[in-house]
Amino acid sequence: MFHVKLPGHDAIARQVGDHLVTHRVKLPRKVVERPIRQVVKRLIMALLLLVATAFVVYADRDGYQDDSDGTLDLLDAFYYATVTLSTTGYGDITPVSDSARLTNIFVITPLRVLFLIILVGTTLEVLTERTREEWRLNRWRSTLRDHTVVIGFGTKGRSAIQTVCVTGLKKEQVVVVDPSAKAIDAATAEGYAGVIGDATRSDVLKQAEVHKARQIIVAPQRDDTSVLVTLTARQLNRSAKIVAAVREEENAPLLKQSGADAVITSSGAAGRLLGLSVLSPAAGMVMEDLIQQGSGLDLVERPVVRGEVGMKPRETDDLVVSVVRGHRVLGYDDPSVGTLQLTDRLITIVRATPAAQVTPNIRPLPRG
């Protein structure tokens, strides 16, 4: 059974251990007061009403009759207030004077109603909140299409989300899947929807609507997890673009066989960048700038426009580094490129500008 939970209920989420596989969807929203704080506030209000009622009774203690000893002390006043406000009414203490009965009619009865409203209101608010959460979740599922699913909200997952969002992807179109409740809390705090659970299980990925996703980024902590997630995701969605990260290069072919369209070797990429920086610090700075989307220089992929058809890659206005033709990626100086065709796509280096970041036909290259 799936339990739906929206952000803002952090106290409940923390009760679930990170090792426990849960299936909960969390949608981002504005930070609201925690439920435990709301309950404490209502409890304080109820106690204040109880104290006020007790002192009202004690002030007119001569108008009440106690069947046990005939006198009404402060403890008896609190006892009478408790059984009266809770509508228990044992009848051992009763108002006998006109003033005490009038006080019960015009003061204590309204306090009793207010007391019950506070207690019942807490329950009603919880039920209303659950209904609201379920409505938000159903609406979210019905409107979610062509979104991006990110498996793992670690350093790689965060960086990947930031990169695709810089190019114009809305946060509402990103769903994060992670087994850690703390990681999902961090994701929803940044405005992303999150699913707590093991992404190697198909029922967890279905909660993230993977079957309707346009692209899937697989960035868990372990390579074997990446393989299992990729296999499961590809079974659920045959057309989505899957980009996966691995630590060891020897696992990259296995991931491609599992259904990944692109595999990034994180440790290898970092090592090559370190080596390049040793040989040429300036070249290392340029490469780091290129893989940091939205600042300085950016690597982008765009379609060939009609005015460029028949040109050679170097004759275009942009700095073309590669040509994507079909399933092949050709260098700009590859003789087999010849002239540009309308169905080609160009990988270019451009200056990062707000206009380029939101152009729908331009998309960033996968990052390491």
Image: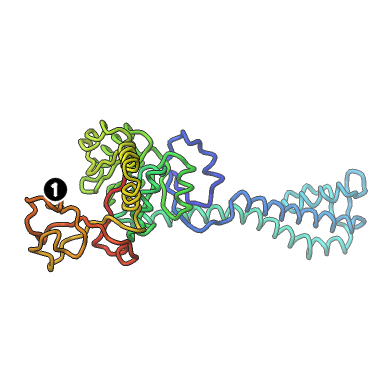
Is residue 82 at all visible to an observer of this figure? yes
Position of the C terminus by quadrant: top left
Crowdedness near tag 1: few (<14), some (14–19) or many (≥20) residues, C-alpha within 10 Å: few
Disc 1 is placed on an element classified as loop
Q: Quadrant of residue 62?
A: bottom right
Residue at the image position 10 percent from the left and 64 percent from the top:
309
Quadrant (top left/top right/bottom left/bottom right) for the N terminus:
top left
Q: Residue furthest bottom?
A: 307
Return the residue nearer the eye: 338 or 140. Answer: 338
Q: Residue 351 appears at what percent x and percent y? A: 30, 62
Of the pair 288 and 163, the residue shown nearer to us: 288
| Rendering coords of residue 325 (x, y %) | 12, 52
Total count of labels: 1
Would residue 68 appear left or right of 105 to someone viewing this image? right
Q: Write the residue at 27% across / 33% down.
A: 249
Residues 133 and 245: in front is 245
Query: Can you identify the residue that label 1 sits on?
Result: 327
352 relative position to 101: left or right: left
- At 13% across and 65% down in the image, what residue appears? 308
Image coordinates of residue 194 in percent, x first then y, are: 42, 48
Q: Position of residue 173 (x, y in %)?
A: 35, 56
Q: Is residue 1 visible?
A: no
Drawn side of residue 84 relative to residue 312, left or right: right
Q: Quadrant of residue 298?
A: bottom left
- 223, 264: nearer the viewer: 264
Q: Amino acid at mark 1?
A: His
Q: Tell me which colouring the rendered structure shows.
A: rainbow
